[in-house]
Image (cartoon, helix red, strand yellow):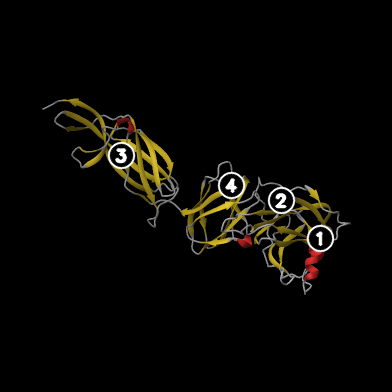
């Protein structure tokens, strides 16, 4: 039925455009490995054998169903296999082609839209990575549209090993789509926070990051959908891999001028995520504040003769909070911070490593070691013996000093009313 519909569409146009196409865009032929853990395509419905099939031009395109995986063959260099698919509503159409696992074989993938007014096929996009590389692209599809998919042998072929083809449809893509191919990468610079969605298990979101001067920064990927796991691949300007980042971790990058690429994909599930590009490291901390739940009635600012300072009880946990800032006086999002506490006269130094939140705020719970009560304060009802408590904050990554404070560390008291 669909083949008859295609023939009718072609015949009803005043021009013979069903096989016409625009020249393909030039894409660097470099290998970009598919994300590990993504769903592997395998034949769920074999197309006609290459001896029987004659889908080597657009007028003989084979209709395929959305969400079904097909296997087919290219048996000569330069040969083309054509297919077409119908989109039921507006949304995102993704085409994915996995070539034979052979370093000598290089297949390309293209998608065309049938212009119902002219009868011509309009080239939407080409995916032309290197040999043995999964080709993938996406486009904004219209309701009731017909889209033609072409698989071409640029180099090599196989009569015995098929390629696999999938066309999948997403009705509600995020505003950054389509961005499933490096040529569709969203260009950004500075320190943006990007909120996007993995709308199907094959979805790949590409970002092109522009760097004009030597830049030190941190990158972090956070998934926001329970049960889904995403990851981040980082590439240099030649699409050479610079590494992979796991969801929920922060990674430091030192980048020279150029264009770099981030690719977010799913190892399981779909949903929303946040990709944050952050200042490199903190250079100072703001005012520190304290809470001591174990001594809540008496843990508060007092004046023991050296100004109003927080008083904490020795031998009990103290919660230290603060905010880290970078050299531009901006919040050092997700900065790694180390908080030290030492009681005067005690060699034991308590250390706590924490990670700040997106606004640079950090919280560390440290023990206030017991001291000797080297200082005395007379409050007319009793004598308070106390020591200095020293709080120091450092950058965990660079060991740079961020700030410090001194508080009253209460040791004990002796009742002596006047």
Where the N terminus falls, by quadrant?
Answer: bottom right
Q: Position of residue 57 (x, y in %)?
A: 81, 65
Q: Residues within 10 Å of mark 3 (few under 14, many from 20)?
A: some
Of labels 2 and 4, the one closer to you? 2
Left or right of 87? Residue 208 is left
Q: Residue at x 63, y 60 (%)?
A: 182
In the rendered structure, find residue 3 and report the number of the disc placed on it: 1
In the rendered structure, find residue 230 and report the number of the disc placed on it: 4
Of labels 4 and 1, the one closer to you? 1
Q: Which residue is mark 2?
A: 67
* Cα gap from disc 2 to disc 1, whole angstroms: 19 Å
Secondary structure state at the residue bearing disc 4 = strand
For the question of whether residue 80 can be seen, the reply is: no
Q: Relative to the observer, which residue lies in front, 103 or 299? A: 299
User: Counting residues from the N terminus, which is met first, the one under dot 4 or under dot 1?
Assistant: 1
User: Counting residues from the N terminus, which is met first, the one under dot 2 or under dot 1?
Assistant: 1
Q: Relative to the observer, which residue lies in front, 65 or 332? A: 65
Secondary structure state at the residue bearing disc 1 = helix
Q: Which residue is mark 3?
A: 390
- The quarter of the picture where residue 383 lies is top left
For the question of whether residue 278 can be seen, the reply is: yes
Compared to residue 417, the image places residue 306 above or below, namely: below
Q: Position of residue 96 (x, y in %)?
A: 70, 55
């Amino acid at each position: 039925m669909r083949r008859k519909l295609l023939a009718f569409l072609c015949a009803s146009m005043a021009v013979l455009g069903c096989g016409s196409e625009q020249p393909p865009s030039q894409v660097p032929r470099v290998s970009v490995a598919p994300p590990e853990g993504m769903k592997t395509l395998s034949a769920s419905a074999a197309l006609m054998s290459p001896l029987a099939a004659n889908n080597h031009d657009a007028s003989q395109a084979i209709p395929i169903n959305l969400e079904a995986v097909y296997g087919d063959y290219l048996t000569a260099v330069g040969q083309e296999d054509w297919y077409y698919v119908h989109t039921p509503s507006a949304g995102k159409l993704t085409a994915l082609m996995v070539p034979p696992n052979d370093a000598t074989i290089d297949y390309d993938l293209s998608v065309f839209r049938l212009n119902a007014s002219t009868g011509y096929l309009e080239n939407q996009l080409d995916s032309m990575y290197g040999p043995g590389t999964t080709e993938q692209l996406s486009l904004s599809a219209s309701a009731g549209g017909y889209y033609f998919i072409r698989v071409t042998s640029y180099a090599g072929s196989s009569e015995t090993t098929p390629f696999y083809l999938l066309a999948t449809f997403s009705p509600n893509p995020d505003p950054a789509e389509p961005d499933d191919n490096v040529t569709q990468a969203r260009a950004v610079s500075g320190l943006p926070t990007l909120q996007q969605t993995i709308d199907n298990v094959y979805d790949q979101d590409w970002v092109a990051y522009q760097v004009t001067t030597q830049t030190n920064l941190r990158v972090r990927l956070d998934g926001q959908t329970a049960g889904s796991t995403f990851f981040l691949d980082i590439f240099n300007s030649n699409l050479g891999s610079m590494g992979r980042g796991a969801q929920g971790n922060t990674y430091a990058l030192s980048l020279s001028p150029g264009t770099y690429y981030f690719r977010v994909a799913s190892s399981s599930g779909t949903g929303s995520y946040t990709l944050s590009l952050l200042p490199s490291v903190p250079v100072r901390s703001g005012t520190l504040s304290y809470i001591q739940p174990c001594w809540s009635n008496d843990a508060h600012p007092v004046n023991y003769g050296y100004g109003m300072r927080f008083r904490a009880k020795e031998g009990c946990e103290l919660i230290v909070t603060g905010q880290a800032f970078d050299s531009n006086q901006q919040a050092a999002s997700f900065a790694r911070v180390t908080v030290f506490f030492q009681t005067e006269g005690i060699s034991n130094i308590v250390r706590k490593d924490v990670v700040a939140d997106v606004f640079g705020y950090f919280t560390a719970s440290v023990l206030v070691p017991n001291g000797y009560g080297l200082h005395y304060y007379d409050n007319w009802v009793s004598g308070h013996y106390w020591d200095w408590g020293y709080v120091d904050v450092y950058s965990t990554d660079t060991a740079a000093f961020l700030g410090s404070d001194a508080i009253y560390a209460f040791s004990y008291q002796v009742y002596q009313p006047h």
